[in-house]
Image (tube, rainbow, N blue to C red):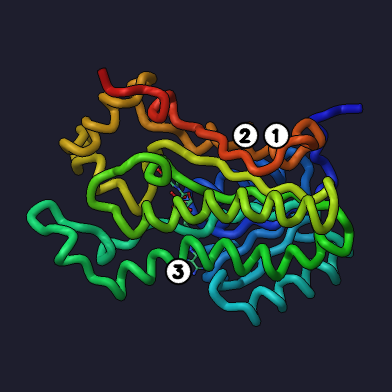
């Protein structure tokens, strides 16, 4: 038995037009998994799937906060494949309005923006699990991989709402790992990855200058990362592959850091 065989597994990936989940979705397709690329924008989805065989894989235009759209996506997946083996919740991220600018304090925080970022990351993880999890419940099998971040376990300045949301995503991961195992058996697993700092569209301007040098914040991150660099999108592939493969079949409720040592380093 090949513990790491994920060929023929049907894997739904939300946020598949994004930097991390998009790169991951293409990797999974290259491993011969059947990948459901989920995103809000049809044009971006077809770009993300460029060159892939659409009879093997599929695109679902879907907002992760729209339960009806998620239900339609679930129906389309079941119609095409008749099953689902894994759900990767890659949609999420920070929002500029929900941050605390350097010259501001907590008391200036825009609570409605704070609520938006919590909604996207927390409800945008919970709702796909609620909808696609029905398939896992019926099958008595399925692996869920959520996206946390370094902001969940220790304070990262300025990104309060995002941190609050990712901490809740970790808590949800553990709660559902227990809930699903107790109610539906050991075939249903829920884990998360916690990427360190990867350059994406959302954080590029925060971490790097237009000339490619680091901002003060970018340099502070590098100083606290023993590897001395940001991550590359391909460095999350192996962890997610493991978490959806039979190699991890006794693993649930874990949060795996992929961070070049950021989380284990005091900075001194
Ligand atoms: N880049 C990093 O350093 C980093 C670090 C830790 C965690 N993360 C997390 O990794 C995940 C992917 O982030 P990324 O860095 O690739 O950013 P990204 O912006 O490239 O990808 C996020 C994707 O989510 C999609 N999205 C946003 N709102 C949505 C909605 N309502 N419905 C459906 N899709 C929606 C976006 O369109 C985008 O495609 C996020 O959860 C992010 O919080 C990123």
Mark 3 CB in 8 Å range of ligand 1?
Answer: no
Q: Residues within 10 Å of mark 3 (few under 14, many from 20)?
A: some
Q: Would you name the residue on which mark 1 appears?
A: 242
User: Camera-side residue: 78 or 22?
Assistant: 78
Asked whether the residues under the numbered discs 3 and 1 touch, taking CB atoms below 8 Å apart as contact, a structural biologist would say no
Q: Which x, y percent locates residue 109?
A: 21, 66
Choose mark 2 or mark 3, whichever is in front: 3
User: Camera-side residue: 30 or 243?
Assistant: 243
Measure the C-alpha gap from mark 3 to mark 1. Answer: 28 Å
Asked if one can make out residue 95 in the rendered structure from this viewpoint, the answer is: yes
Measure the C-alpha gap from mark 2 to mark 3. Answer: 26 Å
Q: Would you name the residue on which mark 3 appears?
A: 119
Asked whether the residues under the numbered discs 1 and 2 touch, taking CB atoms below 8 Å apart as contact, a structural biologist would say yes
Q: Judging from the image, what secondary structure is the residue with disc 1 in? A: helix
Q: Is residue 260 above or below residue 30?
A: above
* Residue 74, quarter of picture: bottom right
Mark 2 or mark 3: which comes first in sequence? 3
Furthest residue toward left: 103
Q: Which mark is residue 239?
A: 2
Mark 3 or mark 1: which comes first in sequence? 3
Q: Which x, y percent locates residue 163?
A: 37, 52
Q: Residues within 10 Å of mark 2 (few under 14, many from 20)?
A: some
């Amino acid at each position: 038995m090949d513990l790491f065989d994920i060929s023929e597994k049907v894997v739904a990936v939300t946020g598949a037009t994004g930097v991390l989940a998009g790169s991951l979705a293409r990797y999974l397709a290259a491993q011969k998994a059947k990948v459901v690329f989920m995103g809000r924008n049809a044009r971006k989805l077809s770009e993300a799937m460029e060159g892939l065989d659409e009879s093997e894989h599929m695109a679902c235009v879907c907002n992760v906060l729209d339960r009806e759209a998620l239900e339609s996506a679930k129906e389309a997946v079941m119609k095409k494949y008749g099953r689902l083996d894994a759900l990767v919740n890659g949609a999420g991220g920070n929002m500029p309005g929900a941050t605390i600018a350097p010259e501001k304090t907590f008391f200036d925080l825009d609570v409605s923006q704070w609520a938006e970022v919590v909604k996207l990351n927390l409800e945008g993880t919970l709702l796909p699990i609620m909808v696609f999890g029905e398939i896992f419940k019926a099958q008595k099998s399925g692996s869920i991989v959520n996206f946390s971040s370094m902001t969940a376990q220790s304070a990262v300045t300025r990104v309060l709402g995002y941190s609050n949301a990712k901490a809740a995503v970790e808590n949800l991961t553990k709660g559902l790992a227990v809930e699903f195992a107790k109610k539906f058996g050991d075939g249903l697993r829920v884990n998360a990855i916690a990427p360190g700092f990867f350059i994406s569209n959302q954080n590029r301007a925060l971490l790097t200058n237009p000339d490619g040098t680091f901002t003060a914040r970018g340099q502070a991150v590098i100083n606290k990362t023993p590897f001395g660099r940001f991550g590359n999108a391909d460095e999350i592939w192996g962890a997610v592959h493991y978490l959806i493969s039979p190699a991890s079949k006794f693993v649930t409720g874990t949060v795996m850091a992929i961070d070049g040592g950021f989380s284990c380093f005091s900075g001194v």
